[in-house]
Image: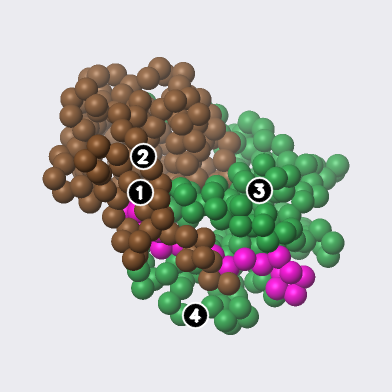
Chain colours: A green, B brown
Amino acid sequence: MSESDLLEMLENARLTPSGRNAQTLRYVLSNTAEMNALIFPTLSWAGYLTDWDGPEEGERPSAYIVILNDDTLSKTYFCDHGIVSLAILLTAIEKGYGGCIIAAVNRDTLRDTLSIPEKYSIVQVIALGKPAETVVIEPMVNGDIKYWRDSQGIHHVPKRSLEEIIVV
Amino acid sequence: MSESDLLEMLENARLTPSGRNAQTLRYVLSNTAEMNALIFPTLSWAGYLTDWDGPEEGERPSAYIVILNDDTLSKTYFCDHGIVSLAILLTAIEKGYGGCIIAAVNRDTLRDTLSIPEKYSIVQVIALGKPAETVVIEPMVNGDIKYWRDSQGIHHVPKRSLEEIIVV
């Protein structure tokens, strides 16, 4: 993935609404084999797929965006991390990529490995690349939130219905 | 604003990524004059515009989406509130509306007024309507994050540059 692809994603993230307009989030971009290899082992993959250790060599993300918060500006960033993450993912999809937000990060290791200064907290990581698998969204059955993979390798993601999520 | 407009926004929100795919967020929809009038006084408007008390009658939002979390499923919703809020706002803009995420909510009053059951926490409110004002995004100067309104009533929102938000 080119640097200009990543910059386009961040350009959209940059323009989104921000709580108190404070814009305290910061970004580390990775799209080299060397840096990607440092980030990959600090991430946990697909918690519900217990018989899967994560993507094999060759199917691993070709880029990452590490989202940080500059705690010296404010430790509170409201819902900004979700807003920028969706902006990044939508831009990625528009460009033919796929992505995944990963909050299960070994933050101490990642901080050491990338020499991230203490003033930044590590919020989450977005993994990006050409999708190797087909994802289908389907109705949730019996409140079972677990995504699953079928024998053809298709990844199924159950979603709650509109009726279920509207309280009034 | 019609109910079908609001349902379209929620339909897009419903399909977004969710932490652990748990989808614990729930929604209250308001698009009647009566219900809107109950919600309006529980919200604080544009903290930096200290000489403005919020929108006048006739310029007030024509709809609200109150975002709740079902705490009985999980009290943790990661960045889901930001993700769904951006999905709602982008859908609103696509349909010719504008919107604003409001986290400064008098939650006790709003809960009482709308009889929101205790099992739901009130996360934030999205105000929606036809925009009465022009918004321009511009480069931030000297780290001043405050949005401001000029003598023509144009609302200026300073945003940090790409250079400023990229750490590596």
Position of residue B168 relative to residue B70, above or below, is below
- Residue at which label 4 appears: A117
Q: Which residue is mark 1?
A: B157
Residue range in magenta is A18-37
Q: SS of the residue at dot 2?
A: strand
Dot 3 alpha-carbon crowd within 10 angstroms: few under 14, some 14 to 19, many 20 or more: many
Tell me the CA gap for discs 4 and 1: 29 Å
Circles 2 and 1, Cβ within 8 Å, touching? The answer is yes
Residue drawn at the location 54% of the way across and 78% of the way down? A116
| Chain of the residue under the numbered disc 3 shown in the image | A
Q: Is residue B96 left or right of residue A138?
A: left
Does residue A59 appear anywhere in the picture? yes
Q: Which residue is mark 2?
A: B135
Q: Chain of mark 4?
A: A
Mark 1 vs mark 3: in front: 1
> Could you tell me which residue is drawn at 32 percent across and 58 percent down?
B145
User: Which quadrant of the view contains residue B25?
Assistant: top left
Percent position (x, y) of residue A89?
61, 48
Q: Residues within 10 Å of mark 2 (few under 14, many from 20)?
A: some
> Front-most of A154 and B154?
B154
Front residue of B42/A10: it is: A10
Q: What crowding class fits label 1: few (fewer than 14 Cα within 10 Å), some (14-19), or many (20 or more)?
A: some
